[in-house]
Image (cartoon, rainbow, N blue to C red):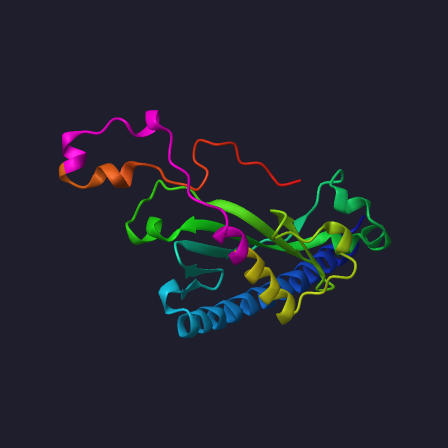
Amino acid sequence: MDCSEIGNLIQQKTELRNLVSKNTHQAFEDFKNASKAIALEFNNSFPITDSKFEDIGDFEFKLSFGSDTLVFLQHTNVFEFPRLHEVMKIPYIKEDKKRSYCGMINIYNFLSDSFEYDRDFDIGYLIGRVFINKDNHYFIEGKREVGLLYTSFHKAIMSKDSVFNIIKSSMEYVNSFDLLTPPFDQVKFSTIGEIKSNQAIKKQITGKRLGFEFKQDK
């Protein structure tokens, strides 16, 4: 293979990645705008929820409500699925392998108090990963209430309506996903210094399912 052929292959792959990145970032901006609107609507109609939107940068933002915070992160890279992944077996991908290259938006759930009180060791949970391809089609890996199966990949087109639905499904899921007491043996020790400096509470790792097995819903 000469330099011209290699150059053409690199150019084709770069064009594909650029298109996927563009679609993913547009979807991320739609997620931002929808989250702003939801926070405003909740604050106007349900002020006790103390809903707020926080823009962290080009690839991250937070949506807080009640005791929960959703963190949305867009990965800057484009990914290909492993050959044995189920998505690679569907006709939509077999017809055009380029459709399997996807950008990714991660959705994490944290306790709002973890940010408020700088509890750096608290645990958040990945509740969904949104994959978007060159055709602006998408599917979601995640908890059952949030996820959209890969078998719908061929017909699910990313839009402002789908963005709103994903956010609302995520909010509904985490609102029903309750905080459990941490295991006694994990918190039974503290030092005088930690008590005096108020570090004992910060040091206690807190998460909604801490100490309990957390499996993907089936």
* 181 and 37: which is toward the camera: 181
Residue 195 seen in this snapshot: yes
The x, y position of residue 113, in whole percent, is: 33, 51
Q: Is 141 situated left or right of 180 in this image?
A: right
Judge whether residue 187 is colored magenta. yes
Report the span colored magenta. Answer: 171-195
Q: Quadrant of the C terminus?
A: top right
The residue positioned 61% from the left and 47% from the top of the image is 142
Q: Is 136 situated left or right of 67 in this image?
A: right
The x, y position of residue 172, in whole percent, is: 53, 56
Q: Is residue 167 above or below residue 202?
A: below
* 68 and 45: which is toward the camera: 45
Q: Is 120 situated left or right of 107 in this image?
A: left
The residue positioned 60% from the left and 60% from the top of the image is 166
The x, y position of residue 30, in whole percent, is: 56, 69
The residue positioned 86% from the left and 54% from the top of the image is 95
The x, y position of residue 210, in whole percent, is: 43, 35
Judge whether residue 48 is colored magenta. no
The residue positioned 48% from the left and 64% from the top of the image is 58
Quarter residue 205 falls in: top left
Q: Is residue 138 above or below residue 204?
A: below
* 3 and 170: which is toward the camera: 170
Quarter residue 215 falls in: top right
Residue 74 seen in this snapshot: no
